[in-house]
Amino acid sequence: MHWLRFFHIIGVLIWYRLDVFFVREDRPNISSRLLNTLLFWRHAPEKRAVRLRLALEKLGPIFVKFGQMLSTRRDLLPTDVADELTKLQDQVPPFPYAQVEAIIEEAFAAPLSTVYTEFNTTPVASASVAQVHFAKLHSGEQVAVKVLRPGIAAIIHRDIALLRTLAWWVKKLSAEGRRLKPDEMVDEFARHTEHELDLTLEAAQCAQLGRNFSDRSLLVPSVYWDYSHKHVMTMQRMFGLPVRDTAALMAHGINLTKLAHEGVEIFFTQVFRDGFFHADMHPGNIQVVTQGPDKGKFIALDFGIMGSLSATDQYYLARNFLAFFNRDYRDVAVAHIESGWVPADTNVEALETAVRAICEPIFEKPLKDISFGRTLLSLFQMSRRFGVNIQPQLVMLQKTLLNIEGLGRELDPNIDLWQSAKPFLKRWMSEQIGWRSLLKSAKRELPYILTHAADMPRLFEQYLRNQTELGKQQSRIDNLLNAQHQQATWQKWATTAIIVLVLLQCASLFLLFNH
């Protein structure tokens, strides 16, 4: 079956003329001409990006998911291909309820009726990896139950192995193919899908995001851990309208302009306050509450893909953005080098010139018309020209930023993301490097200092004793090294003397026998 699947993939590649992605049409060689004659003879009227999308849809849900991931790698893909791949929809027919029931009963070693008092047999959502059903617990809570598609792990592992094989061939056959770095793309896809195959990981990420927003500025469903498993995740059912249904939201009295600004604020809070962000915030994963005390608040759904940033990443992102706001292109270049996003030996002046070439045309537009996400993408593409591979978490951030930006402009076409972001970034930088940072560090360390204050004299005495002992040990080590050195010196002289004596004896014997 593995080889049948492989030949099916090759057949689809040939039928949709995907050779254009690894053979330069303007520089045909003997091998490419031979391939075209034998295999790629079919005339395909559709554009190359459309052909790629159709081929991925033909190959099934795992390849659709791979295409969706590819659409986020705008630092690697041509614009026309990335734009077309965003049209891929991860919607597949649901698997039968009998299989859902079997998976749940195996996970909890109990009949489904003892776990849920009600269970809707018709799924509310069905994707390539899992599907979701509404249910009700015996305690009365209404829940959403996510169930992993049966056999999906084996299918994913098989198709990823085939993708690796195809990536290897693409790299071997063409320099143009190597430029697209297909092996890196497959590795990135493998990392994402492995996380989605264990729903306890998704549940943990959901719980973490919920704790980060305990103030309820963003609503995150609670996880019911007693009813969750590697193949089943039970979470609080959320009630809201899809964020894209703007007409219905306005009919419920939701202020779209306010909603757009709050969405931007939530995004920057995730990135710069928590360093942990929802990396799949397309409109299908966002709802809005339309009634009750939480009216007008966002609801986050689907936590399979999350991103995290280190404190260093957060600092250099904020510094880059603020330098960009102030048109300080040299500081953008210096920040890129100091952060390690480009090699340390990069020429600052050359990098500054490249940044200026990107940024100056952007500032010719009104700020509200400037794409925050595409600016970040341009900087990443420029960084690649200077010999660096952008880290996955920054690519995920750029993708999420594009999603948030698109959503914000759908809600309010006049939103100025720069105006919303700049005060936030200034405040964050002030908290990181100003007196607020010192105060925060002091508050964080104060309990530890107070707890160990009584031990300080003893610890200091122990430190001095250790230093004295270390000094004695170092002195003994130095004496041993000196002794070894002296012994080595004597051995060297003794060896030299023996060699000289042997040579003299040999010379004497030679003279004796010759006379």
Image (cartoon, rainbow, N blue to C red):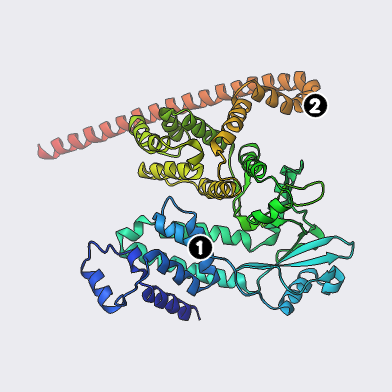
| Mark 2, residue position | 451
Name which residue lies at 13% across and 35% down.
Answer: 511
Residue 114 image-quadrant placement: bottom right
Spot the residue most to the left: 515
Q: Look at discs 2 and 1 and give the one toward the viewer.
A: 1
Q: Are marks 2 and 1 in contact (CB under 8 Å)?
A: no
Name which residue lies at 58% across and 28% down.
Answer: 426
Instruction: Tell me if I can see residue 303 in this picture.
Output: no
Q: Residues within 10 Å of mark 2 (few under 14, many from 20)?
A: few
Name which residue lies at 84% across and 68% down.
Answer: 115
Q: Residues within 10 Å of mark 1 (few under 14, many from 20)?
A: few
Residue 475 image-quadrant placement: top right
Residue type at mark 1 is: Lys
Left/right placement of residue 460 relative to residue 309 reads right
Mark 1 lies on a secondary structure that is loop
Instruction: Tell me if I can see residue 458 in this picture.
Output: yes
Task: Reply above or below: 433 against 133.
Answer: above
Q: Position of residue 486 (x, y in %)?
A: 43, 25
The mark nearer the N terminus, 2 or 1, is 1
| Mark 1, residue position | 87
Between residues 201 and 459, which one lies in front from this camera angle?
201
Left/right placement of residue 38 relative to residue 409 reads left
Task: Reply above or below: 27 against 41.
Answer: above
Q: Position of residue 242 (x, y in %)?
A: 67, 57
Mark 2 lies on a secondary structure that is helix
Q: CA distance from mark 2 to mark 1?
A: 58 Å
Residue type at mark 2 is: Thr
Name which residue lies at 83% across and 75% down.
Answer: 111
**Which mark, by number, is residue 342?**
none
